[in-house]
Every structure is written in structure tokens, then in C-alpha cells.
Amino acid sequence: MTDEEPPIVERGLLAMSDSEWDEAVRQAAVIAPLAASDVVGRGAVNDAATLLGVSHRQVYVLIDRYRRGTGRVTDLLPGRSGGGRGGGRLTPPVEAVIDGLIRKRYLKRQKLSLAVVHRDIVRACTEEGLPAPSRSTVARRVAELHPTTVARRREGADAARPLPSAGGIVPEISAPLEQVQIDHTVIDLVIVDERDRQPVGRPYLTAAIDVYSRCLVGMVVTLEPPSAVSVGLCLAHVCSDKRPWLEGLGIGGDWPMSGKPRLLYLDNASEFKSEALRRGCEQHGIQLDYRPLGRPHYGGIVERVIGTVMAQIHELPGTTFSNPVERRTYDSEKTAALTLNELERWLALAVVSYHGSIHSGLAQTPAARWDQGITESGKPPVVTSPTAFLVDFLPVLRRKLGRTGFVIDHVHYFANVLKPWIARRDRLERFVIRRDPRDISRIWVLDPEGNNYVEVPYRTLSNPAVTLWEHRQAVARLREQGRAQVNEQELFRMIGQMREIASTAQRDTRRSRRDRERRSQLKSGHNLNVLKPPRDGMAGDSPPAAPFDDIEEW
């Protein structure tokens, strides 16, 4: 989040200010271990009350909320209050001014004093005709900030980063999923499209490795470059039971490594620092940590495992090898033979085989190491609804609600569930919305009075499901035609024309084949891991489109 963003004043999960969210995360870190215990001793309650600055009774209330919830940060949030005794009396605009100026003035390396920040808040409120808060109110808001956040913003990243070890030695990992590393790579293989078996280019792999056991605990293969969505898909794959996915691939092997990681260890790429990933991980109690700059060996485990996979990829037809010298005169495109579906099935089989092979660094198989850790530390929690989990990691949009629903990038969305909010839309701020770039036919809207998402489809249900890249291509072509204003009907007409051109071309270009393969993914669910192998194991036509509900639940 940048300092230039307007203050966030809507309420709800993603609508909380940074200080409110940090406080909820801090409480969850203390309460979650207590809630997991069958018996909570008085001493533990005393310690928690001291750490959180609340009463003993409030600690028991928080434990009860967490146990009755689903293991998420927002389970600890109290019911909404309209003010009065024990409730907040400041109006949302005043809260927005306080939150915005604390972020822009107090949480800066200039380290302004509380008195200076309070004066700025009073001045801003006066200019906007709002009642000015007292200095003690501002002081309470500052005191509620997480100490790590304050240290990082006022002293610098080095002051806030806990040193992982002394002497550059990575700390020992003692249990499965205690630390999971995620990384991306472009696969050294040219794949072909489902229809004509013509080359479409190299796909991308996002892989997650459990450091304790060296097991691959999740992966995603896609034609799209690495993004926050790739990370969210991979994380959903990590946390979910993989048996339905394996059955969809027609694989009888076992891949039991699933569950919520305690910590994700990532590099410093932008997709690993998105708001969606940060808040999604905090919502589900997953910590984030990043490699120290200039120390690439800190992420070497995931890179070594990916390197092992790539070495096996080099044995497949259509490989590009690792470099031109190694490839020599080998024609990768001419020999390409595997579709994206077939490649993912091959990778899944390779992973199952890898888990049963002796790992030189462990002196045992990764599967045996995993089983040993599970026996000692217990089975990790598994996500029961991958779709609901994935929504927490999709890109975030913020929009006002109109008389006919939401309009996002020239596309209208409406559902009956919006009607109560439409009736009082003038009193509501911007809504928090999640959208899946792979299929923009529906969005998920955060209830402004709660912490749940509601699904909202196209207002015109006859419009086809499209990807965001396809939508943007159509908008660009309409602009090229001199259309100053783009309406929804013209937009989908252009998308239809583009699809017709791509599907009826006498000689497909590589780009049009890749575009068609992306649409095939949208229909058959490649990116959602409900792949079905070609009939009789042979190449054939693309599988028929599956119902969207089936696609989403993969």
C-alpha cells in the first residue's frame, strides 16, 4: 500500500485500516495456540492478557470466538457497534483522517512526534468541517499499531527484520509445513495446442516445496506469466486434499502432502508482495518472510528441486534444454508433442515418483520424512473449500455500488443479493471486490457489514465467460477503431469477432494458437486443476466445457 492511496474508510475484512488489521493479526498470533489446546491454564491466560493489554475475561471471549470460527484472523472480530458506551463515537470520515495521516506523517522515516501529527489531524478535520479528535485518541490509535510495522516504517527494514540465524546459517526446520518455499520458472519445453497439435510456446511452473521433508506440496502449470493469481492458485493447491485433482488427471498414485503452511519463504518479486497475498495469508494465519537481498542461497531448496524437475523435462520431446549450447541443432518446435494437459499429468506422475526416491540430503525418501514429521507433530489442517480459500488471494478492486449494480471495466454485474445495499448505496463507501483474471464472468463482493463474500455474475448472463487478457485485447482494438466510449455490447461483439478469426484462420500463427489454448483452459479448467486426460490416453479434441461450479471446486 502506498502513501498516496486515499484513506480506507469502508468497513469489513479488507476494508480495515492497517492499524486495525495489524491488531487483529497480533491477537490471532496469541489466541490461536490457546484455542488449539483442550485445557487453557490460568497462567497462559494471564500471559495472553498481559501481551494483548486486555482483561482475563476478554481473553476467554477471544478464545471462544476463535474456536467457533474457521481458524481465520477475522474470527476474532467482535460484532459491529453503533457507538455508545464501549463503542467508537468517531464518525468514519474522522477515522479516515486519523488513519490516513498516521500512515502518511507518523509512519515515516522523518519520525515526527505525536504532537506534530495530532496538530496535522486537527488542521485537516477543521478544513473539512469535521470534529477534531483529542490527542489521547490519536495516541491510542498509535499505540494500537503493531511494533514491527512502526519499526519498519520509522526506522527502516533492517530494524524490523528478525535475523533468521547467526553466521548466515538457515535455522533448522523441525516439522512439516513449518516453512514452505514458493518459486516460479518457465518450463524448458514447447507444448502444442489441443486441436491441431501445433506449438504454442513454453508454459510456466509455480511450485511449493516443504523444507522439512523436501516434498513438493503444490504446483500450478499455466500459460500466463507469474502473478499474484499464480501464487494464490499454488497456495490453494498446497492447502487442499489432492485426491480429487489426481482422479481428474486419471492418476492412481498418492500425493498426501497437504495442509496450511505456517510460514511462506519467498523471494522479493512483486507478485509475492501484493496486498491480496499479504492479507490473504494473514487472514488464514500464514506468516510471510522474504529472502535477504543479496543472499540467493536462502531460497536454494526450492530452486534445487525445480532444477531436478527441469533435468527430467529435458528428456521429453520438444525440450528447449537449459541453453542454446546444450540444445545445439535440436528443433524444439518441430519435435513438440505434449499438450498442457499432458504435461501437467506427466509432472504429477513425476512428483509422485520423486516422493518415493531416496533424497541424498535426507538419507530417506521425502514421503518417509513427511510421514515421520506427521507422526511426531500431528496432521496439519486441510482446506475443505478450495474455492472460498482462493477468493482470499484474488486481486482486489474497490468500487462504488450503482443503481444497477457494479460496473467494472465496461462490464455490468448484478445479483439480487445487492438490492438491500443498492437501496442505501449513498450511505455506503466503496466495496471491496475480488476478481479472477482467468474468468471475469463473476466477481466476489465483500459484505460491508460482515466478513463474507457474495458471488455476483454478469448482469447479462448470456455474455460468454472471458479472460481478463482477452477483455483487454478487445478494448484496445475498439480504441484503435476510434471508439471514444466503450459499451458492453460492443465489447462482447468484438470478443466474438476475435474468437471467430482465431478459430477459422487457415494458417494459425503461434500467438493465435496460444490465445485459443488459453480459451481452452477457460473451458476445460486447466488452470483450476480439474484436468481430464485425453480418451484412451491419446491426443484428441479439446474436452467439452465443464459447468463452472465443477470447474471452481477442482
Image: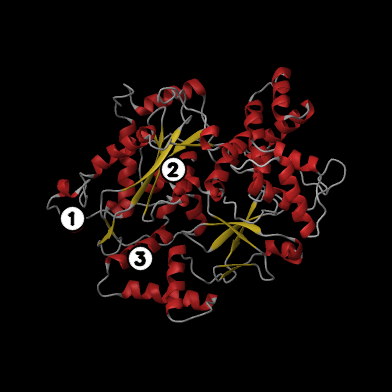
Labelled pair 3, 1 in contact (Cβ < 8 Å) = no
Q: Residues within 10 Å of mark 1 (few under 14, many from 20)?
A: some
Q: Nearer the viewer, residue 375 or 106?
A: 106
Cα gap from disc 3 to disc 1, whole angstroms? 21 Å
Q: Which amino acid type is shown beneath numbered disc 2?
A: Asn
Residue 194 position in % (x across, y down):
30, 60
Looking at marks 1 and 2 on the same chain, the residue that comes earlier in the sequence is marked by: 2
Labelled pair 1, 2 in contact (Cβ < 8 Å) = no
Residue found at x 20% / y 44%:
315
* Label 2: element kind: loop
Q: Which amino acid type is shown beneath numbered disc 1?
A: Thr
Residue 71 seen from this side: no
- Which image quarter: residue 326? top left
Q: Residues within 10 Å of mark 2 (few under 14, many from 20)?
A: few
Q: Which residue is mark 3?
A: 516
Rendered view: 59 above or below 318: above
* Label 3: element kind: helix
Q: Which amino acid type is shown beneath numbered disc 3?
A: Arg
Q: Which residue is mark 2?
A: 268
